[in-house]
């Protein structure tokens, strides 16, 4: 994946955690749409591996049972 694509995805994740979804989409969408099929596959893998980057969850977060 191109460094510029990775930077855009990381910035979009940061904005999403700040509830700035419109800005996140404005940054991520153009790089996703411009990706060729190889880079598109890399983007999909990166997104799947970094879901918590967007949610802000650490993986150790557990909901308490009432």
Image (cartoon, rainbow, N blue to C red):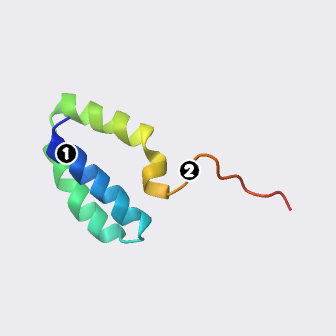
SS for dot 1: helix
Q: Residue at x 49, y 57 (%)?
A: 55
Q: For the N terminus, which image quadrant?
A: top left
Identify residue for label 2: 58
Percent x, y for residue 43? Answer: 29, 38
Q: Residue furthest top?
A: 38
Q: Which mark is residue 50?
A: none
* Circles 2, 1 touching at the beta carbon (< 8 Å): no
65 relative to 15 in the view: left or right: right
Observer-nearest residue: 33 or 43? 43
Where is residue 49, by image quadrant? top left
Identify residue for label 1: 5
Vertical arrangement, residue 23 with respect to residue 30, above or below: below
Q: Residue at x 20, y 28 (%)?
A: 38
Closer to viewer: mark 2 or mark 1: 2
Where is residue 39, by image quadrant? top left
Question: Callout 2: 10 Å neighbours few (<14), some, many (20+)?
Answer: few
66 relative to 22 in the view: left or right: right
Percent x, y for residue 37? Answer: 19, 31
Q: How many numbered marks does the figure carry?
A: 2
39 relative to 24 in the view: left or right: left
Vertical arrangement, residue 6 with respect to residue 42, above or below: below
Q: Considering only order in the chain, which callout, 1 or 2, is on the residue closer to the N terminus?
A: 1
Q: Residue at x 22, y 53 (%)?
A: 8
**CA distance separating discs 2 and 1:** 23 Å
Percent x, y for residue 51? Answer: 46, 47
Q: For the C terminus, which image quadrant?
A: bottom right
Question: Callout 1: 10 Å neighbours few (<14), some, many (20+)?
Answer: some
Percent x, y for residue 16? Answer: 39, 63
Q: Residue at x 24, y 44 (%)?
A: 6
Q: Residue furthest right?
A: 66
SS for dot 2: loop
């Amino acid at each position: 994946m191109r460094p510029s694509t990775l930077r855009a995805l990381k910035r979009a994740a940061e904005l999403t955690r700040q509830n700035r979804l419109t800005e996140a989409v404005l940054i991520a969408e153009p790089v996703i749409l411009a990706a060729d099929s190889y880079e598109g596959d890399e983007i999909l893998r990166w997104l799947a591996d970094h879901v918590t980057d967007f949610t802000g969850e650490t993986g150790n977060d557990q909901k308490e049972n009432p």
